[in-house]
Image (tube, rainbow, N blue to C red):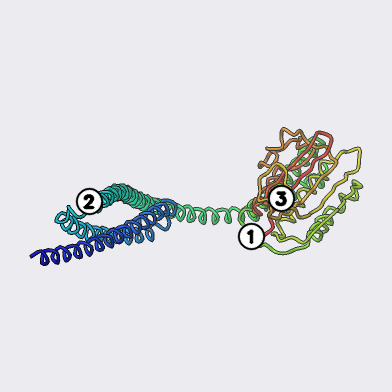
């Protein structure tokens, strides 16, 4: 019986050693699973941070988060399996308490570690809940933006309808303006020519007219001439607004020489000096630039000092936007600078903001003739080229005009 008891005890010791070895393997497996769980948790933290910084990739990150959640669920299932295995091991351990005192202490430590891991899992779960709430909030914001975009599109459609209405009104106004232009160029000027003709015949042929009556007819002729000039200037101003804008490459010097030739008689009469310093090839609306120079040169000759010959300087060059004074332009974009200056009578600087308005005159029309439309036409031409015009002047010190026109790409 003692031999049988010893054999049974040896068998039990052998079984105990097997159970201890299995417990060691189970604990190693549990440590490996805990390490894997920490790695998964770290990956989840990185994924959540990536989600916060990459809203545009939100949908992709959400898909990755779903995969991470599935991986976490898989890890939880694995953990539950390991916990079930641990329960079985604990039950086996309960039957061998007398032989496993040391193993019990190790199991307590393992349980404490497992409790810590469970606590960490709870924190990760809380972080995941917060991340999901943030994702839901972002989705809500996206829906709000979509609703705002729908409202914006509706408002834009209404604005497009208004633009179409304004376009139709503008077409009608242009037609009316064309009718006015035709009337001005034909019906209004013909009576003026007749008035000038008949007044001239009466003042020349009627010998019995008194000096007073003859002076009246001369005044009629002058008034008709001023009216004819005014109509011509108004026609020029309206054409600047309505004519088709065709940009062409043209040599600026050629335009300047043509304009100078038109004033050659006045230039010779006043002994004026026209200095063309620098020119370049330009891409502009040729006839408008010619009209602009015609008005600026005409004003420089008209408002010259009576006691000294006019000295007029003209040039055209290219420069960068950052070189334009008192203006904000694209610093690296190129512009044409057209410069016209003179040594004439000038004007008070306080009027430099109003001289470009239609019918604005700073001088007595009896002393210096004109309609007050010339500089308004100049400004309109500059605006048609998307440019700006700047002027500086002092009384008795002449005037200077600088036009800056962007060079087309």
> Is the Cβ of the residue at disc 3 closer than 8 Å to that at disc 2?
no
* Most distant residue in the front direction: 2
- Ranked by sequence position, the earlier of labels 3 and 2 is 2
Q: CA distance from mark 1 to mark 2?
A: 102 Å
Element assignment for label 1? loop
To which quarter of the image does residue 400 belong?
top right
Residue that badge 3 annotates: 404
* Numbered tag placed on residue 245 in the rendering: 1
Where is residue 79? Give x, y as percent.
25, 58
- Residue positioned 47% across, 53% down in the render: 163
For discs 1 and 2, the disc positioned in front in the rendered view: 2
Q: Residue furthest left?
A: 1
Quadrant of the rendering where the N terminus is positioned: bottom left
Mark 3 vs mark 1, CA separation in Å: 18 Å
Q: Position of residue 209 (x, y in %)?
A: 80, 39
Q: Is residue 363 left or right of residue 177?
A: right
- Residue 109, position as x, y percentages in the image: 28, 49
| Mark-to-mark CA distance, 3 and 2 | 98 Å
Kindly check if marks 3 and 1 are in contact, taking CB atoms under 8 A apart as contact: no
Q: Quadrant of the C terminus?
A: bottom right
Using a 10 Å C-alpha cutoff, classify the residue at mark 1 as few (fewer than 14 neighbours), some (14 to 19) or many (20 or more).
some
Res. 362 mark: none
The image shows residue 43 at horizontal and vertical percentages of 39, 57
Mark 2, other Cα within 10 Å: few <14 / some 14–19 / many ≥20: few
In the structure shown, which secondary structural element does the residue marked by tag 3 occupy?
Answer: strand
For label 3, the crowd category at 10 Å Cα-Cα, with few meaning under 14, some 14 to 19 and many 20 or more, is many
Q: Which label sits in the foreground, 3 or 2?
A: 2
Left or right of residue 100: residue 221: right
Q: Nearer the viewer, mark 3 or mark 1?
A: 3
Q: Which residue is mark 2?
A: 101
Residue found 14% across the figure and 67% down from its top: 7
Q: Earlier in the sequence, mark 3 or mark 1?
A: 1
């Amino acid at each position: 019986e003692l031999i049988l008891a010893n054999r049974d005890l040896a068998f039990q010791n052998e079984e105990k050693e097997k159970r201890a070895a299995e417990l060691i393997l189970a604990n190693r497996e549990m440590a490996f699973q805990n390490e894997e769980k920490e790695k998964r948790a770290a990956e989840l933290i990185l994924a959540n941070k990536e989600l916060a910084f990459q809203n545009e990739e939100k949908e992709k990150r959400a898909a990755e988060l779903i995969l991470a959640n599935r991986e976490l669920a898989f890890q939880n299932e694995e953990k539950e399996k390991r916990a079930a295995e641990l329960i079985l091991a604990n039950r086996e351990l309960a039957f061998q308490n007398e032989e496993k005192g040391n193993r019990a202490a190790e199991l307590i430590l393992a349980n404490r570690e497992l409790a810590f891991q469970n606590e960490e899992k709870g924190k990760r779960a809380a972080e995941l809940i917060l991340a999901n709430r943030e994702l839901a909030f972002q989705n809500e914001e996206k829906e709000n933006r979509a609703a705002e975009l729908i409202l914006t599109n509706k408002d834009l459609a209404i604005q497009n309808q208004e633009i179409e209405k304004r376009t139709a009104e503008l077409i009608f106004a242009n037609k009316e303006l064309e009718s006015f232009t035709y009337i001005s160029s034909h019906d209004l000027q013909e009576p003026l020519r007749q008035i000038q003709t008949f007044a001239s015949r009466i003042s020349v042929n009627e010998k019995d007219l008194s000096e007073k009556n003859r002076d009246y007819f001369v005044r009629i002729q002058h008034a008709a001439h001023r009216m004819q000039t005014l109509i011509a200037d108004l026609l020029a101003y309206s054409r600047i607004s309505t004519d088709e804008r065709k940009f062409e490459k043209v040599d600026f010097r050629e335009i300047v020489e043509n304009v100078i030739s038109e004033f050659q008689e006045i230039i010779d009469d006043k002994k004026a000096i026209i200095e063309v310093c620098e020119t370049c090839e330009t891409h502009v609306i040729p006839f408008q630039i010619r009209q602009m120079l015609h008005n600026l040169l005409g004003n420089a000759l008209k408002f010259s000092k009576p006691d000294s010959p006019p000295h007029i300087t003209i040039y055209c060059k290219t420069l960068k936007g950052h070189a334009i004074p008192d203006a904000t332009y694209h610093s690296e974009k190129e512009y044409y600078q057209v410069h016209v200056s003179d040594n004439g009578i000038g004007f008070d600087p306080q009027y430099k903001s109003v001289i470009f308005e239609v019918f604005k005159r700073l001088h007595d029309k009896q002393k210096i003739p004109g309609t007050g439309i010339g500089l308004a036409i100049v400004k309109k031409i500059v605006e048609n080229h998307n440019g700006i015009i700047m002027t500086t002047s002092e009384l008795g010190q002449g005037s200077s005009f600088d036009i800056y026109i962007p060079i087309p790409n």
